[in-house]
Image (tube, rainbow, N blue to C red):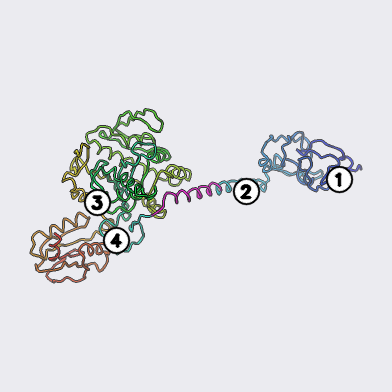
């Protein structure tokens, strides 16, 4: 027989995509012997790889076109399409049907054509590895980006006890501390006239115990008096910031001073603690709405707007046309709808109502599954808010609020200080300026505070729903009735109101008949009346019936009347 080594010597034809090397290839300056060529030591010559001749022929890492028939199986065309991707070529099976040359060796019984499941599995594993690498890469990017963005935005500083789980009642200072109140401020930002005027002032009040939420607007033209003078409330932040800067404070410290000033004013007007604040500019609001795919709102006849406006961002005129009914607004339309000063029966009060509706719609979209579980959306929201939002909430508290927000579902109750049925504020003029003031008087906030207390009830008081009996233990007539109304305004359930068997009580007495089963109500009553509760009635003739607490008012209460 002829020596097959001699037959192959000098051949340079194409075989299954491998171009034979010259008969005497060089490696590191040394000639290769026939043994190296015949027994398949892998070599690289002229940019090509010559592999082990014992392995199956077919597609390997090669860009060379395939032609002719399979060398071990005459008549079977090797007609696999060309591919410019080495990865794809390396991943495909060795034959068009996945069967190797050894299976077609002369004299052997031919096997049925079938897929080589091992190679299919290998292909699947490779594809899975590629997908895993992509997931890890994208996830790592989002984590890194999120880490820096979150720490850039959520710096912390504010605090709300009610956000903790299993809250110790002793940590709650008084009624209302069982809620989380966040002041939301909107300003124009850089590039806009009046960049630091907070024309949007809202309080989002959240009940984390019963999963309820409310929105209340403070009109931007509300007239207030501060230690530095009087002005509309939308200018308080700007003036305080300017004063701090004039005294040498840097930009960050000046903004903190401005925020503190407006937080103090809102807390004073509404008589509630402000635990956190969040301030966004126009760009952030527009970007956030666009990121979540726009918002859907129900437009009333009073809040419909058709107005031609100037768009500072595009420097073009913009026609805002929001008609009554269900409307879908993109970022630009939502921003102009919130800012519009369109003349309506209630003027700026309808503008505040539009802002409350938009905040509710945006909150609902952000906390929806389609946004909350979409890493791309979350990344885009971080971009939208990143440099255009400031807040004193921490990352942990923000995550806790997000969890609560998902349960609330963006369903906020809107509180209107200028409700047509019972308005508490009115418009007026001071120093030639159009302003908003309480109907009761320029600095009389009592009516506003009563509405806020009765609307923003403490979550622990609602949950425990303790029944309270109030008895007058003094000679002062009407004292029990007054205290009963006061407690009801905070959300307490007051039943019997009357006189005690005796009228010589010097100090108020609180009797807890629940054996400590309603600790939050007990804590609030003790702090309100400044006495410790007892478990025994001082007079056996008092019949508590179904009451959980009995309060006998003493003479000390007449001093606080």
Q: Secondary structure at mark 1?
A: strand
Q: Which region is colored magenta?
A: 137-156
Q: Nearer the viewer, mark 4 or mark 3?
A: 3
Q: Report crowding for label 2: few under 14, some 14 to 19, many 20 or more residues within 10 A (C-alpha).
A: few
Q: Report crowding for label 4: few under 14, some 14 to 19, many 20 or more residues within 10 A (C-alpha).
A: some
Quarter of the figure with residue 192: top left
Q: Nearer the viewer, mark 4 or mark 2?
A: 4
Quarter of the figure with residue 100: top right
The residue indicated by pointer 4 is 172
In the rendered image, residue 267, in percent from the top left (x then y), is placed at: 27, 51
The residue indicated by pointer 1 is 31
The residue indicated by pointer 2 is 125
Q: Are marks 3 and 2 in contact (CB under 8 Å)?
A: no
- Residue placed farthest to the right in the image? 1
The residue indicated by pointer 3 is 268
Of the two numbered discs 4 and 2 on the same chain, state the one appearing first in sequence. Answer: 2
Of the two numbered discs 3 and 1 on the same chain, state the one appearing first in sequence. Answer: 1
Q: Residue at x 29, y 31 (%)?
A: 305
Q: Is residue 143 magenta?
A: yes
């Amino acid at each position: 027989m002829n020596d097959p080594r001699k037959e192959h010597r000098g051949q340079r034809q194409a075989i299954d995509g491998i171009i034979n090397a010259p008969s005497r290839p060089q490696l590191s300056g040394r000639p290769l012997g026939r043994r190296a060529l015949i027994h398949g030591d892998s070599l690289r010559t002229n940019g090509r790889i010559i592999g082990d001749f014992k392995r199956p022929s077919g597609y390997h890492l090669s860009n060379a076109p395939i032609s002719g028939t399979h060398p071990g199986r005459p008549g079977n065309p090797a007609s696999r399409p060309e591919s410019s991707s080495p990865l794809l070529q390396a991943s495909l099976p060795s034959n068009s049907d996945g069967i190797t040359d050894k299976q077609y060796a002369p004299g052997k019984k031919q096997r049925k054509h079938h897929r080589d499941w091992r190679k299919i599995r290998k292909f699947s594993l490779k594809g899975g590895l590629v997908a895993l690498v992509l997931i890890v890469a994208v996830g790592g990017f989002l984590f890194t980006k999120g880490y820096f963005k979150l720490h850039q935005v959520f710096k912390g500083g504010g605090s709300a006890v009610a956000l903790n789980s299993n809250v110790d009642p002793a940590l709650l200072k008084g009624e209302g501390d069982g809620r989380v109140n966040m002041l939301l401020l909107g300003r124009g930002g850089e590039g806009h006239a009046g960049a630091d005027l907070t024309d949007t002032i809202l309080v989002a009040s959240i009940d984390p115990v019963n999963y309820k939420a409310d929105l209340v607007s403070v009109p931007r033209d509300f007239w207030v008096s501060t230690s530095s003078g009087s002005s509309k409330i939308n200018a308080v932040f700007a003036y305080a910031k300017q004063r701090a800067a004039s005294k040498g404070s840097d930009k960050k410290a000046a903004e903190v001073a401005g925020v503190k000033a407006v937080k103090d004013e809102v807390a004073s007007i509404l008589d509630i603690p402000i635990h956190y604040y969040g301030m966004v500019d126009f760009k952030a609001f527009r970007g956030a709405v666009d990121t979540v795919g726009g918002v859907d709102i129900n437009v009333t006849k009073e809040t419909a707007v058709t107005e031609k406006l100037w768009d500072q961002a595009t420097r073009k005129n913009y026609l805002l046309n929001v008609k009554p009914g269900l409307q879908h607004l993109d970022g630009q339309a939502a921003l102009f709808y919130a800012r519009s000063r369109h003349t309506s029966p209630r003027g700026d009060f309808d503008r505040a109502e539009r802002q409350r509706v938009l905040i509710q719609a945006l909150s609902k979209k952000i906390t929806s599954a389609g946004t909350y579980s979409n890493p791309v959306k979350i990344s885009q929201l971080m971009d939208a808010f990143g440099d255009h939002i400031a807040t004193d909430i921490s990352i942990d508290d923000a995550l806790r609020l997000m969890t609560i927000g998902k349960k609330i579902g963006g369903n906020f109750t809107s509180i209107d200080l200028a409700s047509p049925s019972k308005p508490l504020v009115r418009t007026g003029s001071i120093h030639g300026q159009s302003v908003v003031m309480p109907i009761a008087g320029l600095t009389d906030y009592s009516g506003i505070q009563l509405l806020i207390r009765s609307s923003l009830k403490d979550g622990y008081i609602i949950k425990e729903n303790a029944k309270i009996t109030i008895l007058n233990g003094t000679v002062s007539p009407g004292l029990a009735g007054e205290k009963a109304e006061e407690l009801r305004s905070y959300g307490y359930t007051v039943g019997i109101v009357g006189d005690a068997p005796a009228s010589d009580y010097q100090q108020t007495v609180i009797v807890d008949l629940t054996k400590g089963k309603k600790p939050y109500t007990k804590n609030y009553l003790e702090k309100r009346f400044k006495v410790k509760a007892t478990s025994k009635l001082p007079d056996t003739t008092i019949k508590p019936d179904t009451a959980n607490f009995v309060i006998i008012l003493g003479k000390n209460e007449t001093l606080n009347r």
